[in-house]
Amino acid sequence: MKSDSKIYRFFLGRRSDKSMPFVIILLILVPFLIAGQYYKNRNYNALSANPAFTKTVVSETHIMKGSPSINYTILVDGKKYKGGCSIGGFSVGDSIGVVYQKDNPKNNMPVFEYYDGAENGTIVVIVIIIVVLSVYRWWKINKKYNDRCPVLERSGACNIYRMDKEYIFVTAYGKFGHNDSYPIKFMPIDCSNGEFEDTLMEIFDASLHNKYIELKAAELIKAMKQRSWRQLYMHSTSVFVHFDRQNEQKLIITPTKPIVGKSSRGLDWDYDRSLSFNLDNSSWKDIINSIRKLLQHNETGR
């Protein structure tokens, strides 16, 4: 079982996400924007170090990327050089002043743009946008982090028993989880949902990755710190939590009920109250709450 950390989800998203990771977007977008701004400011610095002034007229007006723009042509030493900028309020034939770099007239701009100075505002805006988006993304992930669902690589299972004062988590092995063994964990009844979740995830991880150690029934009940199976059945409620990868990535929770009959010494599956959750779109907090409620509900019927 893999539980993605906040840092992992911030940069790469959930493992099941198919969208482009946030870090990839940053790696593509930020260098591109900064490099473009750096190149533009470098041209300005070169121009301001060796400027020359001339006059020309607007040769063309048009709309570029939704903004009004102008084009013009300057004549330097008998050669024509084109230029332009994004600005409105000009018509074809209007006179404008132009600044060009003496040793490189291709680098030019209108006088009003030149006197505005190097354009650092765009970088500031980019940085502010990135910071705002990052803060929002972190807030969103932090808010939902406790609701995260684990990513399970294959089928796994766990039996959870609710005693008077504690929960007993027993690792289940095999395709259908019929083989119980170590590790076995104990948690107090008043444990937090976070502690309950961590224990369940630890048991699931063992079910997925640990080597099964066969235990006899007497050895297993002793490891669970119970005197007998009859005592366990009489003084506990239980649920079987099973991840079925073949069944649409669903986590299935099946509670038990006492066997009705002359010798009421065992438990049977209560399929009528069985629950299933799709891990791709379910809240892990809801899953934990559902497990604990099923165990409480069973207790009232003992």
Image: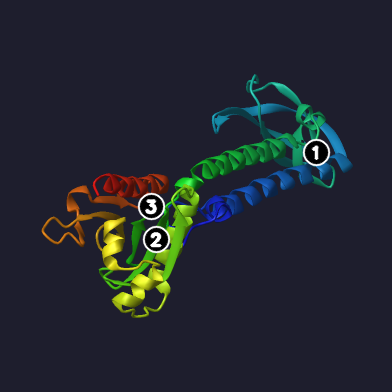
Q: Which mark is residue 168?
A: 2
Does residue 266 appear to the left or right of 294 in the view shown?
A: left
Which residue does the image show at 41% across and 49% down from the upper left? 284
Q: Where is residue 191 shown, x and y percent of the image?
A: 48, 50
Q: Which residue is mark 1?
A: 100
* Mark 1–mark 3 distance (CA, rounded to whole Å): 86 Å
Per the model, the C-alpha gap separating discs 2 and 1 is 80 Å
The numbered mark, 2 or 1, whose residue comes first in the sequence reads 1
Left or right of 108, for residue 153: left
> Residue, x 55% and y 33% (percent of image)?
65
Image quadrant in which you'd find residue 218: bottom left
Looking at the rendered image, the disc whose residue lies closer to the viewer, 2 or 1, is: 2
Element type at mark 2: strand
Residue 129 at x, y percent in the picture: 63, 37
Alpha-carbon neighbours of circle 3 within 10 Å: few (<14), some, or many (≥20)? Answer: few
Q: Residue furthest left?
A: 262
Q: Secondary structure at mark 1?
A: strand
Q: Amino acid at mark 3?
A: Asp
Above or below for 209 versus 159:
below
Callout 2, which amino acid?
A: Ile
Q: Quadrant of residue 266?
A: bottom left
Q: Position of residue 71 (x, y in %)?
A: 65, 32
Q: Quadrant of the N terminus?
A: bottom left
Say the numbered circle drawn on residue 164. Answer: 3
**Identity of the residue drawn at 66% across and 26% down:** 87
* Image spot of residue 203 (x, y percent): 42, 65
Q: Amino acid at mark 1?
A: Tyr
| Along the line of sight, the residue nearer the viewer: 254 or 117 | 254
Query: On the rendered structure, is 176 left or right of 184?
Result: left
Q: Quadrant of residue 69?
A: top right
